[in-house]
Image (tube, rainbow, N blue to C red):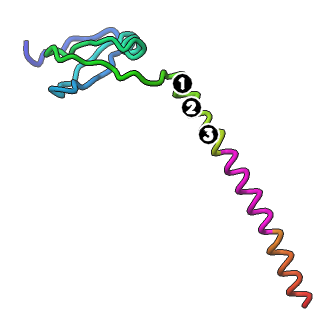
Amino acid sequence: MSGERYPVAEELIVLRCVKCHIQFGIPVAAYHALKRSSDRFCCPFEHGQSFAPGETDEEKIARLEKRIEDRDESIAMLRRRIAARDGVITKLRKRIGDG
């Protein structure tokens, strides 16, 4: 049976065992359930695995959206500072030109 392939009707997420590094697949729904619950599961060679508790997908999205918003504010502030400096430069050039 080694190397045989079987068609799978559902999409799988490929994981890698933290101990033996074998790749194995689990259904998408099971992956998300395990991520949310932090329950333990095993690789095909029965090495225990679990997802470290962390932020949910929703929390990650919110954090990244906040980062984008902060960056947008920083860009807007820098553009205002550049415009202000351009104004000062123009004023100084005019003053120098008028002598």
Q: In the rendered view of the protein, which quadrant contains the C terminus? A: bottom right
Task: Indicate the secondary structure of the residue bearing disc 3.
Answer: helix
Above or below residue 69? Residue 61 is above
10 and 17: which one is in front? 17
Q: Position of residue 81 (x, y in %)?
A: 75, 60
Residue at figure coordinates x 42%, y 14% from the top left: 36
Task: Indicate the secondary structure of the residue bearing disc 1.
Answer: helix
Residue at figure coordinates x 62%, y 35% from the top left: 66
Query: Which residue lies most toward the right here?
Result: 98
Residue 41 shown left or right of residue 79 in the figure: left
Residue 61 shown left or right of residue 88 in the figure: left
As measured in the structure, the alpha-carbon distance from the residue carrying label 1 to the one carrying label 2 is 6 Å
Pointers 1 and 2 in contact (C-beta within 8 Å) = yes
Magenta residue check for 79: yes
Query: Where residue 74 is drawn, which disc sits there?
Result: none
Q: Position of residue 9 (x, y in %)?
A: 32, 8
Quick one: label 3, few (<14), some, or many (20+) residues within 10 Å? Answer: few
Q: Nearer the viewer, mark 3 or mark 2?
A: 2
Residue at figure coordinates x 36%, y 15% from the top left: 38
Magenta residue check for 97: no
The magenta segment: 72-86
Quick one: label 2, few (<14), some, or many (20+) residues within 10 Å? Answer: few
As measured in the structure, the alpha-carbon distance from the residue carrying label 3 to the one carrying label 2 is 9 Å
Identify the residue under disc 2.
63
Q: In the rendered view of the protein, which quadrant contains the N terminus? A: top left
Query: Where residue 59 is drawn, which disc sits there?
Result: 1
Q: Nearer the viewer, mark 3 or mark 1?
A: 1
Amino acid type at circle 2 is: Arg
Query: Which residue lies most toward the left here?
Result: 1
Identify the residue under disc 3.
68
